[in-house]
Image (tube, grey):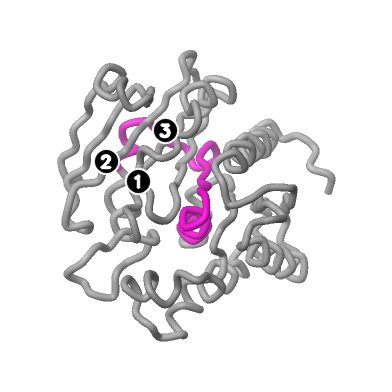
C-alpha cells in the first residue's frame, strides 16, 4: 500500500525563488522518517513519446537545486522528457543508513518513490532514465545498478563513483554508512558495474578535466572498457560547477534521446 502523497501546483508558489515547475509532490515516507519533496517538470506538449528522467542533486543540496540554477522546464520541453527531481537531502548519499532508525533512502526509492511515480505517470522502463551530479551521480548509477531492468539507461555527472576517492568520506559519508572500508567498497558503483556485463545497457559518464572527481569517472570508464560494457565517457573542459552540469545534462539527454530513437552509437 502506497503512503499518502500530496500534489501542489507550484508555478505561483515558488515564483519568488525563480523555480518553474508544474508540480510539487510531497510523500510521507516511513523509510525516510520524514517527508520527501519532489519537483516534477512535464513537457508542454506531453505525448506518447514523452520519456522520464529521474534527476538527482549533489551533496549539501536539495530538490530545488537543479531548477534554481537552470531552466529545467525549458530543457524538459526541448527534449520531451518529464524530469523528476527528488530530495536526496544534505548528506543522504541516496543510501540506507546503517542505523535502521534513520533515513533509508534506497528503500524509499524502490518501495515508495518509483512505484508512486510509475502509477501516477505510467512509467515504462524502456522510456525511463536516471542521472545526477556528484553525490547524485553516485546515487543515480547505484540505483540503476540495483535493477537495470527498471530503466533504459543511466548517467553520472562528476559522480563520486568510488566512495573511497572523495574527501567527504571521513566526515560525511561515514555518518551514513559507517567507517568500514568493506561497506564503502560495496556501495561504490565502480565495484558494482560488472552487473551490466552482457546486458547491452549503454550508459554515459561525464566529468570536467578540472574537476577533482575526474579520476572517479576515468577509472569507472576503464573498468567498463575492460569488461566490455557499452558506455560513453565524456571528458571535457569544466569544473565541479553548475555551468558544467548544465552542459552535461543536455549531453546526457541527447544521448538518452539517441537510445530512444535507436540511433547509431558507433558500435
Query: Front-most of 196 and 19?
Result: 19
Local SS, label 2:
strand
Range shown magenta:
116-144
Query: Front-most of 198 and 136?
Result: 136
Question: What residue did someone put label 3 on?
Answer: 68
Please give left or right for residue 134 compared with residue 23 in the image: right
Q: Position of residue 60 (x, y in %)?
A: 38, 54
Q: Residue at x 71, y 61 (%)?
A: 229
Q: Are marks 1 and 2 in contact (CB under 8 Å)?
A: yes
Question: What residue did someone put label 2 on?
Answer: 37
Extreme residue toward the top, this view: 45
230, above or below 117, in the image: below
First-in-chain label (1 vs 2): 2
Classed neighbour count for the residue bearing mark 3: other residues with Cα under 10 Å, few (<14), some (14–19), many (≥20): few
- Which label number is shown at residue 62? 1
Classed neighbour count for the residue bearing mark 1: other residues with Cα under 10 Å, few (<14), some (14–19), many (≥20): some
Measure how far apart labels 1 and 2 are at the Cα level: 9 Å
Q: Are marks 3 and 2 in contact (CB under 8 Å)?
A: no
Q: Residue at x 54, y 26 (%)?
A: 75
Amino acid at each position: 500500500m502506497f503512503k499518502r502523497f500530496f500534489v501542489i501546483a507550484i508555478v505561483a508558489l515558488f515564483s519568488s525563488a525563480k523555480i518553474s515547475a508544474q508540480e510539487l509532490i510531497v510523500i510521507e515516507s516511513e523509510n525516510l522518517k520524514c517527508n520527501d519533496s519532489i519537483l516534477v517538470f512535464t513537457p508542454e506538449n506531453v505525448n506518447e513519446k514523452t520519456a522520464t528522467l529521474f534527476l538527482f542533486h549533489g551533496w549539501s543540496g536539495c530538490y530545488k537545486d537543479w531548477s534554481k540554477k537552470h531552466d529545467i522546464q525549458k530543457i524538459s520541453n526541448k527534449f520531451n522528457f518529464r524530469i523528476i527531481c527528488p530530495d536526496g537531502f544534505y548528506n543522504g548519499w541516496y543510501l540506507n543508513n546503517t542505523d535502521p532508525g534513520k533515513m533509508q533512502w534506497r528503500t524509499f526509492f524502490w518501495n515508495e518513490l518509483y512505484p508512486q511515480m510509475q502509477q501516477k505517470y505510467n512509467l515504462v522502463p524502456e522510456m525511463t532514465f536516471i542521472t545526477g551530479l556528484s553525490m547524485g551521480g553516485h546515487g543515480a548509477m547505484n540505483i540503476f545498478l540495483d535493477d537495470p531492468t527498471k530503466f533504459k539507461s543511466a548517467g553520472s555527472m562528476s559522480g563520486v563513483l568510488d566512495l573511497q576517492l572523495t574527501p567527504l568520506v571521513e566526515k560525511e559519508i561515514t555518518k551514513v554508512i559507517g567507517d568500514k572500508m568493506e561497506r564503502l567498497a560495496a556501495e561504490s558503483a565502480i565495484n558494482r558495474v560488472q552487473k551490466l556485463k552482457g546486458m547491452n545497457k549503454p550508459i554515459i559518464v561525464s566529468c570536467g578535466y578540472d574537476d577533482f572527481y575526474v579520476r572517479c569517472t576515468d577509472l569507472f570508464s576503464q573498468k567498463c572498457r575492460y569488461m566490455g560494457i557499452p558506455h560513453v565517457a565524456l571528458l571535457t573542459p569544466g569544473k565541479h560547477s553548475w555551468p558544467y552540469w548544465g552542459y552535461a545534462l543536455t549531453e546526457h539527454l541527447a544521448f538518452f534521446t539517441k537510445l530512444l530513437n535507436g540511433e547509431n552509437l558507433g558500435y
